[in-house]
Image (spheres, grey):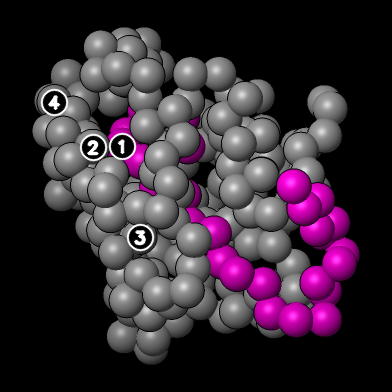
Amino acid sequence: MTAAPSPSSSSSTPRRLTVMAGPTAVGKGTISANIRARYPEIWLSVSATTRDPRPGEVEGVNYFFVGPTKFHEMVEDGELLEWAVVHGQNSYGTPRAAVEAQLNAGIPALLEIDLQGARQVKESMPDAQFIFLAPPSWEELVRRLVGRGTETKEEQERRLETARVELAAQSEFDHVVINDDIERATDEIISLMGLTPHAN
């Protein structure tokens, strides 16, 4: 088996973008935070969103929190690689320039986005690698969503309805990673990005 390249081994050539998507409450944010903490050599894109910050979220780290007017301007000016209205409420999008700059510098880049966004990226960057983060079971997904207590009952129902659609789209992705354990799932994604997992 050929050894995976080190993060610096291909710094002179553009990197392949990795896109991670999955249903609500599957743990995308937790996995991303774990990657950020354990693998600082990987650049994680920060999305813009029109939703309000949740407790503990930091501007420019978790998201760029912008108003609807500013977000619309970004869309109109072609500043977003992808964007979508999620759960029929808030808009999310990935700033294009930052992603392209990292890839051109040879830095491994990871996007954590929703299914709609992943489909848009696939149209504009078909050579990217697409990873679907899935829950161990539907029951576990419901438990995680209800347990985090950040949404109303009505919003939980909307998110679960969206999750059913998202789970049915797994076949559109290059790989499916089961988030049954944060550390294991993180290492699997790192391996798929062509890097060598290391100890915590």
Q: Is residue 145 left or right of residue 176?
A: left
Magenta-tinted stretch = 1-28
Residue drawn at x 47%, y 74% is 127
Tag nearer the camera, 1 or 2: 2
Tag nearer the camera, 2 or 4: 2
Q: Nearer the viewer, residue 32 or 4?
A: 4
Residue at label 4? Answer: 157
Residue drawn at x 13%, y 26% is 157
- Local SS, label 1: loop
User: Please, what is the three-letter code of the amino acid marked with disc 4?
Assistant: Glu
Q: Is label 2 in contact with label 4 (beta carbons under 8 Å)? A: no
Q: Is label 1 in contact with label 4 (beta carbons under 8 Å)? A: no
Q: Earlier in the sequence, mark 2 or mark 3?
A: 3
Q: Which mark is residue 23?
A: 1
Residue at label 3? Answer: 118
- Local SS, label 3: helix
Looking at the image, can residue 127 be seen?
A: yes
- Residue 146 screen position, x and y as percent: 29, 14
Q: CA distance from mark 1 to mark 2?
A: 7 Å
Q: Which mark is residue 37?
A: none
Q: Nearer the viewer, residue 190 or 76?
A: 190
Q: Earlier in the sequence, mark 1 or mark 4?
A: 1
Q: CA distance from mark 2 to mark 3?
A: 13 Å
Instruction: Give the main secondary structure of the magenta stretch.
Output: loop
Q: Is label 1 in contact with label 2 (beta carbons under 8 Å)? A: yes
Residue at label 2? Answer: 167
- Residue 118 screen position, x and y as percent: 35, 60
Q: CA distance from mark 3 to mark 4?
A: 23 Å
